[in-house]
Image (cartoon, rainbow, N blue to C red):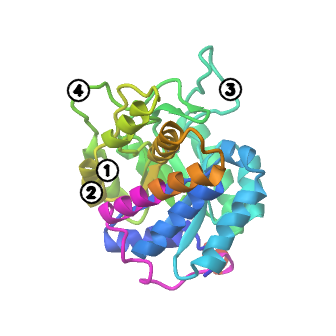
């Protein structure tokens, strides 16, 4: 199967009432772990690449590797290649040319501007609508799906740093969908990017009722949850046990993500957990086998650790078993649907 538009995967998830993990990749081992886990659990999967991952891995290289996994290795698995937090129109165009099947335009933040703390200020509603509409016009002309965002998340992910966090207003969300024509909508419900989402020792609270409200208003639009890593304690403990310094890291409990999915959340973005799994595995090898210097001896266990964890996530989000539910749709076909 060629790569499929993300809209196809999320529309199916919406019909079936389950969630789909969107996992970030920067290198071969992460990608293999994600696709192997999808094949093992027969799950549709979204592989996502941030702007800094594109810089890190020579742009076309990651796209070519993802295409290989989808077309050659696991043709039975619906796989979407998605741009995470597209900052501007230029990057959107570039990714459409590179064969991405989905892009996010993050119009919630003005990436061209930074405040004194290095954070990006929020865009106005109208500014967000304008850049998102432009991204939709371009991406849809390629048959490529578009995710937009309304409201802003706190925390740090690559250079996605907002100067202030704002929860999504459901009325605004409805209006935003109407005015932009997006396929998927990221909403802010109190999660944040990174490993330190909540103060340690406090009760984790999310505004889950916002999901109910937005889902009711725009039931055909797939909702997206950013900053959804669970930051599992066993991973953090493992990192710290082998010489790491990641104190007081707290994420979103899996049960809370499952609740969000029940309420209509469809795309669950996870990056931090993969980073922690890799770091824990590599630190363990370095501590226990200081004589090891073959990268395969520590990147291999890191890849295994990520795969094991993603298998758990795919089961927890009820994605497992759904890979064979539907026929693939090409970007060409999507192009026609958007045009008609
Ligand atoms: Zn994000």
- Which part of the image, by quadrant, shows the C terminus? bottom right
Tell me the crowding category of disc 1: few under 14, some 14 to 19, or many 20 or more residues within 10 angstroms, Cα based: many
Q: Please report the residue visible at 46 percent of the width from the left and 60 percent of the height from the top.
A: 307
Give me the C-alpha separation between circle 2 and circle 3: 35 Å
Residue at the disc numbered 2? 263
Residue at the disc numbered 1? 211
Question: Is 184 in front, or is 100?
Answer: 100
In the rendered structure, the answer to whether residue 142 lies left or right of residue 171 reads right
Q: Is residue 2 visible?
A: no
* Residue depth check, mark 3 versus mark 4: number of the one nearer the observer: 4
Q: Residue furthest top?
A: 116
Region rendered in magenta = 306-332
Q: Please report the residue visible at 70 percent of the width from the left and 58 percent of the height from the top.
A: 62
Give me the C-alpha separation between circle 2 and circle 1: 6 Å
Quadrant of residue 196 within the rendered picture? top left
- Which part of the image, by quadrant, shows the N terminus? bottom right
Residue at the disc numbered 4? 202
- SS of the residue under disc 1: helix
Q: Which of the marked residues, 2 or 1, is nearer the chain's N terminus?
A: 1
């Amino acid at each position: 199967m060629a790569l499929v538009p993300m809209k196809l995967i999320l529309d199916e998830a919406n019909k079936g009432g389950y969630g789909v993990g969107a996992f970030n990749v920067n290198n071969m081992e992460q990608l293999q772990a994600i696709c192997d886990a999808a094949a093992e659990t027969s799950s549709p999967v979204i592989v996502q690449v941030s702007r800094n991952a594109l810089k890190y891995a020579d742009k076309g290289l990651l796209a070519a590797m993802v295409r290989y996994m989808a077309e050659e290795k696991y043709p039975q698995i619906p796989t979407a290649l998605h741009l995470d937090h597209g900052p501007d129109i230029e990057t959107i165009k570039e990714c459409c040319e590179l064969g991405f099947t989905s892009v996010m335009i993050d119009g919630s933040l003005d990436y061209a501007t930074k405040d004194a703390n290095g954070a990006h200020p929020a865009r106005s509603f109208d500014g967000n609508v304008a850049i998102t509409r432009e991204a939709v016009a371009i991406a849809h002309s390629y048959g490529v799906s578009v995710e937009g965002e309304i409201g802003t998340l706190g925390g740090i992910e690559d250079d996605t740093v907002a100067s202030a966090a704002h929860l999504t207003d459901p009325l605004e969300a409805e209006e935003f969908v109407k005015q932009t024509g997006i396929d998927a909508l990221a909403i802010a419900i109190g999660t944040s990017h990174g490993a330190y989402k909540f103060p340690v020792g406090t009760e984790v609270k999310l505004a889950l009722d916002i999901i109910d409200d937005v889902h009711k208003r725009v039931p055909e639009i797939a909702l997206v949850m950013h900053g959804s890593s669970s930051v599992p304690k066993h991973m953090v403990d493992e990192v710290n046990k082998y010489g790491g310094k990641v104190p007081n890291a707290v994420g979103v409990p899996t049960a809370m993500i499952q609740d969000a999915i029940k309420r209509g959340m469809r795309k669950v973005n996870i990056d931090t957990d993969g980073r922690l799994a890799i770091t824990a595995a590599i630190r363990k090898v370095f501590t226990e086998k200081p004589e090891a210097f073959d990268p395969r001896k520590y990147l291999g266990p890191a890849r295994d650790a990520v795969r094991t964890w993603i298998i758990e996530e795919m089961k927890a989000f009820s994605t497992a078993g759904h890979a064979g539910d539907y026929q693939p749709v090409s970007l060409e076909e999507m192009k026609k649907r958007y045009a008609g």
